[in-house]
Amino acid sequence: MKLFKYAALGTATAVLMGTSAMAAGHGCNVTEGRINIVGNEFPAIQSVAAAAIGCASGIEAESNLTADHQKINVAGMTGNPAEYTSAIVANSSIVALINEDVVRPLDDLIAAYGQDIPTRQLITIDGKVMAVAFMANAQHLVYRSDVLEQIGMDVPTSYEDVLAAAEKIRAEGIMENPVGGAYAAGWNLAEEFVNMYLGTGGAFFEPGTANVSINNEQGVEALEMMKALTAYMNPDYLTHDSNATSAEWEAGNVALMNMWGSRTGVLMDDEGSEEVVYSNTVAGGPLTVGDSGVAASTLWWDGWTVAKNISDEEAAATFQALAHATSPALLNDETMSQAVWLMDGFDAQPVNEGVLATVAAGANPYPMLPFMGLLHTALGDNIADFLQGNESAEQALMDIEAAYTASATEQGFLQ
Amino acid sequence: MKHSTFFWFVLPSAILMLAFIALPIVSIVTQSLYTSHEQVLVTVENCGPFGCTEVTSVDQDATQALKAAEPLGKWAGLDVYKDRNHLAVAEVASAWVNADGLPDFGRTLMNLPFYAALAFTLTYTFIVTPLTIVLGFFIAVAVNAIAKALKGPTIFLTLLPFIVTPLVGSLIIFWMVDARGILGTGLQWLADDPTLSVKASTPLMWIMLMFYGIWHSAPFAFVVFYAGLQTVNTDSLEAAMIDGANRWERIRYVVIPHLFPLVTFVALIQLMDNFRVFEPIVSFSAYAHANSLSIAIFNDLGGETRLLSSAAATSVLTIIGVAILLSPVLVRTYRDFSNPR
């Protein structure tokens, strides 16, 4: 018992020394103000938040990382003073914060403390820097090399190839439902449509306005391709989100799927699946659909913001801590494979290849428009009816446009 | 009772009811009559790690000025209620004119989100409520008849579905009815159809949700009726036995009339609860097959852009729905109390 106590004490001391050494060693030491970060919960963001909090010496510093961050960040930054001094967001969720006017432009803070941040990490809207990005993410093909070898086919580069390969895998009796995908009705399903529609070369809105325009040939093509894919999916696909799809993959039931780059690490490690599954899991490039030549995927960044309704002192503290936490100082053996980092000194790992290939293929970034969230919701609510065969593609697209128009009118985007 | 005594006696509850019932209702009614201001849109250049693009954005200064001038928002009257995502007045009217017979009108109606949600909510309410009451009653009669030593443990086990958190209980059933779960595989074996999947079929999903609803709330009805059974007058039961009534006749003519006020009570609570059906749809990931009014409110508030007026309008419509549903029961209760037999 005594021995255990000493051991615990020793570990605690080592941890404390480690933290202070880290804080002192990299020249980040924030002594005034307050830091409180709200953000999503996955390993890369946990590393960033921990590094930012490590900068605080003698001041209040905490973080609230949760999958429900979008439901609380606006509310937590609206008050004055705001509860959260920073929200970690992505290109879809930053628009809600900008629409509500709760984040501040960072130009003066960059001039004072952020001269080292490379321009490519700065998210500029109308000439003002509103966020600093630190990682990239995208969906891309993930495939089982052993299964493709067994059927003697090359790695698919288009969804048409995926259908051909899936047919052959099924015909040879290797797997009953070889295609996977996060097709759960709601946000996930809408995201798959966004990918597919951009891949057909479609545009969501009439330029310069909030008028939606997806009821067209490309819209039908995107929906038809999604339906063709579902024929090779587990019949429960409308309930499978990214987590359930990953579980199907790890169970060895799926050989081809479009999946988030940030999740491939979990699929390729030796936890949760048999050796034959994880050692043959490979991250491929983005897929195309039809002959438009555009990758059917969207590029995402994750970055941090600074709240508007806080004192300048608190803003400076938050900025300095997060600037340090997303500098090359963050990168080490443990954090290197957690994400496709945008900082200098990032050394790509095999799990990151899919995202890098998607960036290289020139995929579109997810549209950073104030009304895109409303369209995303309308998509998520109405596509399932078409996939289940209850209505035609044109009817589904008409429903989506009507649902979007009603909510965009309510929000004042349409007059 | 003196008027002043009565006043001081009810004052605390009156204040609490005002603060926690009346004020929130006033607040959502007000909210539902206003919408966001017109957003001033401008085209700006956005730059980031993936290059620069020309995009439409909100002119914050101009929009904030509008907001500051009228913080409640823009007066919309009943516009939000009438739009496609709620009562869809214009769409229903045009469907009525253009429809090719009633079934076609029904199909168009079911394609509108509010009516689709209402259809499931009402079906759920009217199937789950009576079955809960009947099942709860029979469990109560059965438990009342078993040996004393076994009663305690039996009551505890019977109450379990009600004690389990709804989200957790439905998640457990969700995985059991999965195509590879124990119930899902069992169903495939029973139906002799290896491709049968509860989660992929709308009718099976509706049955599943209602089955869950009954499973979860039957213990509530049971425990109320069980308490009622303890107060049945044994003299009347014995008199009925002497008159030659069998067990069923004793239940039909003595027990059920005695318990009838409790049926009203359970029906009242269950109608309100079932009309607000929410958790099972979330845990069964049933959005593709079933929607309810509560789910619509949740989605309005949980999206990246919060639709406050829309959520408020759906809430007001839910309150109106509950009021309509409860009115027959309330009228009956009122009559019972105002004409004492």
Image: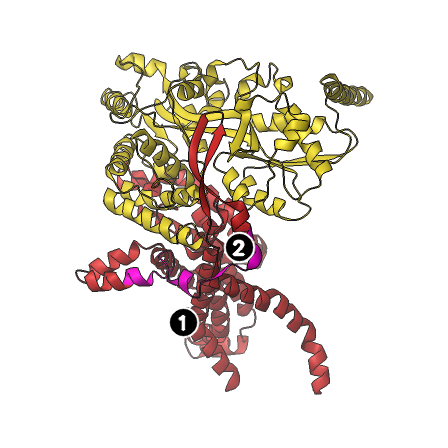
Where residue A73 appears, as percent x and y from the top left, is: 58, 42
The reply to whether the magenta stretch includes residue A155 is: no
Q: Residues within 10 Å of mark 2 (few under 14, many from 20)?
A: some
Where residue B136 appears, as percent x and y from the top left, is: 46, 61
Give the Cα distance between marks 2 and 1.
Answer: 76 Å
Name the amino acid type tagged 2. Answer: Leu
Chain that is yellow in the image: A
The answer to whether residue B138 is left or right of residue A346 is left
- Against B1, residue B173 (above or below) is above
Quarter holding residue A331: top right
Name the amino acid type tagged 1. Answer: Asn
Q: Residue at x 45, y 25 (%)?
A: B51
Instruction: Return the residue nearer the eye: B38 or A199.
Output: B38
Q: Residues within 10 Å of mark 1 (few under 14, many from 20)?
A: few
Q: Residue at x 56, y 40 (%)?
A: A69
Residue marked by disc 2? B66
The reply to whether the magenta stretch includes residue B76 is: yes
Magenta residues span B65-92
- Looking at the rendered structure, whether the residues under marks 2 and 1 are on a common chain is answered as yes
Sooner in the amino-acid sequence: mark 2 or mark 1: 2
Q: Tell me the quarter of the image containing the N terminus of chain A.
A: top right
Looking at the image, can residue B259 be seen? yes
- Against B308, residue B93 (above or below) is below
Residue at the extreme left:
B100
The answer to whether residue A378 is left or right of residue A88 is left
**CB under 8 Å between callouts 2 and 1?**
no
Chain containing the residue with disc 1: B
Question: Which tint is chain B?
Answer: red
Disc number lying in front (2 or 1): 2
Residue marked by disc 1? B246
Q: Residue at x 78, y 30 (%)?
A: A31
